[in-house]
Amino acid sequence: MNPEPVHTDIAVVGAGPAGLSAAVAAAVAGASVTVIDAYSQPGGQYFRQPNPAVDPDPQEPRPRAGRELRHKAEAAGVRFLNRTVVWGAFEDLRLAAYREDTAQAIELQADAIILAPGTYERVAAFPGWTLPGVITTGAAQTLLKEQRLLPGQRIILAGTGPLQLVTAAALVKAGAQVVAVLEGASPGEAILRQPGQTLAAVWGQSTRLKEGWQSWRTLKKAGVPYHRGWGIIAAEGKDSLQAVRIARLDRQWRPIPGTERRLEADTLCLNYGFTPATELAQLFGVQLHWRPAQGGFVPRRDEQMQTNVPGLFIVGDGAGVGGAELAMVEGQIAGLAAARQVLGDSTLTRRIEALQPALRREQRFQQFYARLFTPGPGLDELAAGDTPICRCEGVSKATIVQTIHAGADTMHAVKAVTRCGMGNCQGRVCGPLVAAILAQETGQSPERVGQFRARTPIFPVPLTAFTVLTTEGAESAESRN
Amino acid sequence: MREINSQQAPVVIIGGGIVGSAAAYYLARRGVKAVLLEKNTIGVEASGRNGGGVRAQCRVRIERRLAMASIKLWEGLEAETGMDMEYTQGGNIRLAATEARMAQLQAEAEEELADGLYVELWNRDELRRRAPYLDSDHFIGAKYCPTDGVANPILATWGIAAAARKAGATLLTHTEAVSIETQAGQVTGVTARTPDGILHLETPRVIHAAGVHTPQLAQTSGVQIPIKPARVFVAVTQPVRPFFTEFVSTHDFGVYFRPARKGHVHIGSVGIFDETFDKSTPDYALPRLATAARLVPALRGVSFLRTWAGILAMTPDHLPVIGPVDGLEGLILATGFSGHGFCLGPIVGKLLSEMILDGAPSINLDALNLSRFASTVQSPTSPSSNRL
């Protein structure tokens, strides 16, 4: 049942903009490249392809651009392992994966690995946030992009960042009634305060500005209200969402008393930014550092996107949230740098250097963007005592607070004692929420609080998937037969 | 670092695992308010990372006596402390795949019955009947002890520590003991590093229960303890509909498994001992843990949720070191449990309190004294019969 460990010059984990760009760059430079991705088609969330049964020939620019990149990769000889989840990372640049459709265990050994794992959406915990009908904006986008489905009839989007705007416009175009879009930040104020930085940052960003402008126009035309400086404070409903309570927010994102309103809706889409997926980096022993403007803990990298683990590169939002354009530049740099290392081809250096101006431009935009759309501390104060924080294990905020005050004042101890983060999601949803509570209750900085430590396997994997790994002794030889 | 505090304590306990916490608890119940120093938080090392077995069978005689007495304490511990420890007596099955193993279990059963521990020997048919969830083609028989069971290691350690605090003990977490001071063969104090500075505690008595970290600190008082680290592994599955209650282990396959309250199954390694402090899960541990799926068909479609490693404190004879230290008045050791300490935690804590309050423990522990390592004669214990 088990194939031998597959060797490849370069393994790329994740087939979004960063991973695809890295794969193309490395393969064109002459390396053998294998891309492993959890979805059925390459593209990631940004280039997400519609289900072929629903739309075999999509004409929207993003799926088209994604397919073009994929065709380039295929033409350069890149091998794709789709529907394959990487669940383990081991010494000597080895990856353990599981192919879901064929129930096949795969071990991959590479001379260089480029991780492009992307991010998880950040949610907020407030009374009612676990009601059916409350979803993430990314989930709404997936339904729409892949299945051409609307998540509901009367939709409210809340959180921060341009994803809200773009998704709201797409929902309107698909025929949904969008009741309102609530942007917690007040980006206009920041722009007016720092016009020079704004101009420097948006220089060369015409595609982005155009996309934003078009979304804005779509919402205006449909009469969808876009409230800046407003946020959700509670969701209501018996068995599913019926209404949300909203309020105007101050600079710290705390609700301003007396501004509360109630809006009826059956669907609430939330997105408060993104958290980089660092589990594989953690398993490899990559040093992380705290960069809140990039989504939290992110890997330390050199200019070629290489980490402290020789041969291990990390690119895209999973290395620090910066958007698709930055991800693609980082991917190209890492692809070339990994190929240079593996093939010993120093002529690639010039091409890596040529990408530096584009990298700087995108980094500037990322820094500007982060300043506009970073939630304030008030967001972490919305949960009531009985509000669930860990929905997998049903752990309330009050239980967590109590446990912290009883002495379990580390992320590990909170998890151990309350079971918070022990469920199927492995703490991906509740991790940032628990960290915020711990920081608040102990007065420690988020940097000191840290995060849940990644554990093998980083996604649930059937016991049978473990038998592929190389072992010693008769016992293991037996289990490999 | 500045000295922030200087205090007196009747007893200082080093280590907030199950043994140190239980010692603090039983001392406090009898009016002695010890100060416990824990460098991290309560129960995050071996006490909180083990399989949770609470078992008297398959031990050498001295440990059997301790375990039987400890189980008596376990039976009343949740009611007494008011803390949920997920303790159940679901039974313990030790499997035999070979005739030699079966003979070993038979010999053990005779000793156990003589010591008043009820156990049953099962042949293959009986095993099929009593544990139908096992693929019994792999085994020729088993030994079963109905009064053995499991507890949640984290909640139990946490619960005992909380009860100790409630009874008057002082638990200082994030406080790392850095030296034990002595004068003329007598313990005089302990110095610790806290987040706010250096803490000095004057005390005539120290219970040193810092697990695998015991030797380094003991050296500050001139005591050599032969303990080495050993990494073991545990995995937990996604929850399944409960289909067994027993803690099941097999040394022939190097694995144990047991149910947890919400339907998760914990699977642990037996007999892999890496001499390391590294708590990551290496690749070779995983096939061993997955062996459980070969032995239990119902686990074949089940997924692992996560794995973790724990670091055991191993002595040369795989028996704990408990008791005073010759030539150093006031230091009591309780360490080196070699992977069998979780079940013993409550009774050892109680016996430590008796050493301090009554002058001697109610169960003779001479055989476990550190002095046994000074002689060249080592205990004849077979390590493999004593695992878990």
Image (cartoon, coloured by chain):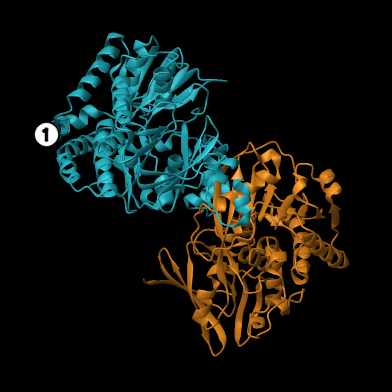
Chain colours: A cyan, B orange
Specify whether residue A382 is in view.
yes
Residue placed most toward the observer, B54 or A348: A348
Q: Give percent across and percent down for residue B95.
A: 76, 54
| Residue underneath mark 1 | A196
B33 in relation to A175, above or below: below
Mark 1 surroundings within 10 Å by alpha-carbon count, few (fewer than 14), some (14 through 19), many (20 or more): few
Looking at the image, residue A92 sits to the left or right of residue A18; the answer is right
Specify whether residue B57 is in view.
no
- Number of marks in picture: 1
Residue occupying image coordinates x 66% and y 64%: B341
Q: Give percent across and percent down for residue A419.
A: 57, 44
Q: Quadrant of residue A170?
A: top left
A39 in relation to B65, above or below: above
Q: Quadrant of residue B161?
A: bottom right
Helix, strand or loop at label 1? It is: helix
Identify the residue at the far bottom of this view.
B184
Q: Give percent across and percent down for residue B197.
A: 40, 68
A158 in relation to B237, above or below: above
Q: Give percent across and percent down for residue B86.
A: 69, 48
Looking at the image, residue A463 sits to the left or right of residue A245; the answer is right
Residue placed most toward the observer, A65 or A396: A65
Residue occupying image coordinates x 28% and y 31%: A324
Tag 1 subunit: A
Residue placed most toward the observer, B239 or A253: B239
A197 in relation to B122, above or below: above
Residue placed most toward the observer, B14 or A443: B14
Type of amino acid at the residue the image marks with label 1: Gly
Considering the image in quadrants, where does the C terminus of chain B appear?
A: bottom right
Considering the image in quadrants, where does the N terminus of chain B appear?
A: bottom left
Identify the residue at the far left of this view.
A196
